Image: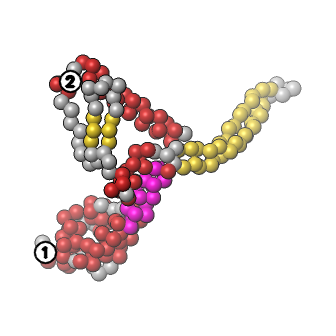
Amino acid sequence: MGASVSLRYSESFPKIAYNACRSHGCTGKELAKLFDVNAKTIYEWAKKYPAFRIAVRKGKDEFDCDKVESKLLQRALGWEKEYEDETVTVKEGTDRDGNAIADKTTTTMKKTMICPPDTRALIHWLGNRRAKRWDKGISVPSTNSNLQIDAKKGSNVQVNIQKLSEEQLESLADIQTKFLNEEETVMEACVG
């Protein structure tokens, strides 16, 4: 199989792979479709041909920096977008001779869609960009003084609910409900 990989590979592939990864963030499977080979071949080319490996890595890095990071920052800071909303009103009736007529009116209004800043995206952005300053962990306050959840960034919070009292379980459910409601509010605001 190694010989067939070498015969199939072309010196033009690194440039093609770089452009695909740079513009679309292609995965190994997507590159395999592009080159009409299986995904294993892409990984073999990356091992065997440094130019191909470097081109794929550089393309993906640039895609992440230019597209994904900028969208995360945009989400963290919030955004506004102006658009025109067109409404068509049709009034039907009859003329003097009894023929059906329709009066069509089009109204155009300028509107602004607003997506407010997202606190979680801000924390994520700052936690990565200013880790020492912002990696202070997360504390979820509770109305119940017996239940306090603290977590460091990147850690999983595990709560053994079998050992919690009825009051603590209710408090945990309140925290979850509050969090889900905040997420819904933000999503609704962003959708318009």
What secondary structure is found at the residue carrying circle 1?
helix
Q: Quadrant of the C terminus?
A: top right
Q: Which residues are magenta?
A: 62-76
Q: Residue 96, located in which quarter of the rendered image?
A: top right
Residue lying at 37% horizontally and 57% vertically, measured from the top left: 130
Viewer-side residue, 192 vs 9: 192
- For disc 1, the marked residue is 2
What secondary structure is found at the residue carrying circle 2?
loop
- Can residue 20 be spotted in the picture? no
Q: Position of residue 87 (x, y in %)?
A: 68, 38
Viewer-side residue, 1 vs 62: 62
Depicted 158 relative to depicted 39: above or below? above
Depicted 1 relative to depicted 122: above or below? below
Residue lying at 26% horizontally and 48% vertically, measured from the top left: 154
Identified by mark 2, the residue type is Leu
Q: Position of residue 142 (x, y in %)?
A: 33, 28
Depicted 74 relative to depicted 102: above or below? below
Furthest toward the bottom, the residue is 11
Furthest toward the right, the residue is 96
- For disc 2, the marked residue is 164
Q: Position of residue 147 (x, y in %)?
A: 27, 28
Q: Is residue 186 left or right of residue 17?
A: right
